Amino acid sequence: MLGLSSKGSGCGPHNLVPSGAIRLLHESYYELQHPPLISSSRVKAKWQRPPLGFMKINLGGPCRAATGIGGIGIVAHDHEGTFPACCSGVSNLLHAKLLPLKEGLLFAQRWPNVQRLIEA
């Protein structure tokens, strides 16, 4: 999880975005070049509401390696659990891995006066 804040200065959370994005690019590129021999199992995780005053943006990029087709999904929730916005799309394997991060960061700009949490 990467917490982003529209407030602050110096070495705050806003400096984590470029390094986090670059790390994700490297990991995704490696995964595409070295696919797993055994399919990974899904881990069940319970969604939790963000703290008061935060907007949580959940994003994902599921894909099927056999077909090379994937999709993206992005949903925003406030601290009450309601969602003011969402979006989705279909893409190829590479985009399904990288596009959610890009779109999630652009999506987060809709709420410049609210602290945001982005989960992938």
Image (tube, rainbow, N blue to C red):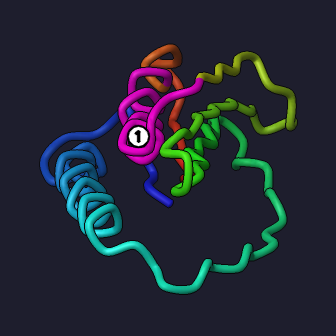
Q: Specify the segment rendered in magenta.
A: 90-107
CA neighbours of label 1 inside 10 A, class few (<14), some (14 to 19), many (20+): many
Residue at which label 1 appears: 101
Question: Would you say residue 46 sits in the magenta stretch?
Answer: no
Q: What amino acid is labelled 1 in the image?
A: Leu
Residue at horizontal 49%, vertical 22%? 107
Displayed quadrant of residue 33 = bottom left
Q: Position of residue 118 (x, y in %)?
A: 52, 45
Residue at horizontal 61%, vertical 49%? 62
Against 107, residue 118 (above or below) is below
Q: Position of residue 105 (x, y in %)?
A: 40, 31
Residue at horizontal 65%, vertical 35%? 53
Against 30, residue 110 (above or below) is above
Q: Residue furthest front?
A: 66
Displayed quadrant of residue 93 = top left
**Nearer to me, 11 or 65:** 65
Question: Would you say residue 100 sits in the magenta stretch?
Answer: yes
Secondary structure under the numbered disc 1 in the rendered image: helix
**Nearer to me, 32 or 6:** 32
Instruction: Give the prevailing secondary structure in the magenta stretch.
Output: helix
**Nearer to me, 48 or 21:** 21
Displayed quadrant of residue 55 = top right
Q: Position of residue 58 (x, y in %)?
A: 63, 43
